[in-house]
Amino acid sequence: MKSRRSRFGSALAVVLTVLVVLPTAVLFLRVLNENTTQRDDTELKQKGIEYLAELAPLISALAESQSSALQGVTAEPASLTAAVARVQGVDENLGDDLDTSSRWAGLKEKIGRLPGISGTAEQVYEAHIEVSDLALELYSEIRENSRLNQDQQSDIWYLQETVTVNMPEAVTHVSRMADLANMVAAAKERQRAALAVLFGAEIKAVEESVAELTDNLQAAAEDTESSTLASNTVNNLDQFRQGVENANRGAHLGSTPDVSVLVTAQSSLTNALKALSTVLLKEMSTLLEDRLDDLNYRRAEAWVMLSVSIVLLIGAAFVARGRAARTGLDSGMSGRDVSVLSDAPGNSAPASNGYGNSPYDPVPAYGDNPNYGSGAGRERSGALR
């Protein structure tokens, strides 16, 4: 009976162990899977930031190329050649992950055709407009394919909106505004009205881009865990906004634009863009690195907890098995007979027979007692002599 009970206890211990292990394993796999998904998502966003860092100079280089082409320079600027080479290099490394290779190949082909564009100023301008629009679309594709625009952390979302939308649009519109100002000044009376409309639209687009940029940076600074975002952003943002304001002053909407002021403003704006873009991309990269470190810590923590659970379960199984073995041994020993005497009344062994405590010791015959006839024994009674 006790043996069956012991076997039942062992089986129950095994069943309970399995019931504990299975939920623990399922929970661990879910945590590990979620952690892996978040790690992959973070690493993809880091690749997007790496691509954006190489793409930012291309916007300024395209603006320079547009201005020089409108002035009659057919050769491609050295800044544009260098910018194209940098984007080509990063696309070769990350294009497959971000699915940008096809779009970049089309944009690169269009850039290569720019030096051969001829015709009127309006035709040259339209050709460069098409290329710069494609560059802005590449920005959008990077932010979407890297899922930066889906980030749940508010400061990263506002920063990526600034870097991928507001800043490139602001620089592009400032460049167009400056070139349209020159075109308005050189246009004939019948062309001037149409160009003035485009000029006014670009001025409004610049103002909107700068306003959105400022709002997004302010929102990011108000809701961030970074201790350096606000301090690193203020000076660079002021320089960027100052460049835009100088360009607006040189535009002189409704009167003759000041070309020299526009050229100076565009140059300072390019430098400000480079500095601000570098700061914001670095802040985003730091925030993502912190997130990745936290995910790595949680991953290690999950493995440690799983290991501890397995060790504890194995230890509990050994303890249960040892108890079951001892219980079986005790049960076996208690069932063995240790006496051949009957338990019936009258057959109980005497406590002692004088010749040993064991009931199996034989009683010697008379005269065989070693104490008799020996010097060491006592003498016989005198009555028997």
Image (cartoon, grey):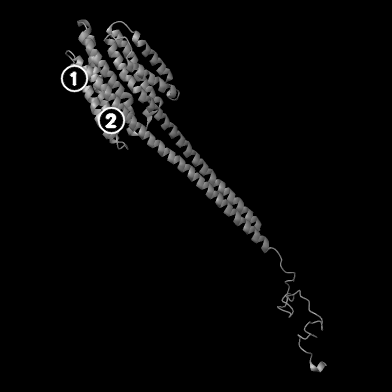
Which residue is situated farthest in the right direction here? 385
Q: Which residue is mark 2?
A: 217
Q: Which residue is mark 1?
A: 249
- Which image quarter: residue 384? bottom right
Q: Position of residue 380 (x, y in %)?
A: 79, 90
| Residue 198 visible (yes or no) | no
Left or right position of 104 against 344: left
Compared with 279, 363 (above or below) is: below
Left or right position of 27 against 220: right
Give neighbour class at mark 2: few <14, some 14-19, many 20+ (Cα, 10 Å).
many
In front here: 29 or 59? 59
Compared with 205, 345 (above or below) is: below
Mark nearer the N terminus (1 vs 2)? 2
The answer to whether the residue labelled 1 contacts the one labelled 2, judged by CB atoms less than 8 Å apart, is: no
- Which image quarter: residue 75? top left
- Which image quarter: residue 372? bottom right
Q: Which mark is residue 380?
A: none
| Residue 317 visible (yes or no) | yes
Query: What is the C-alpha distance between the residues marked 1 and 2?
Result: 24 Å
Compared with 122, 89 (above or below) is: below
Three-letter amino acid code at the position of disc 1 = Arg
Label 2 residue SS: helix
Q: Position of residue 89 (x, y in %)?
A: 41, 21
Q: Residue at x 80, y 94 (%)?
A: 382
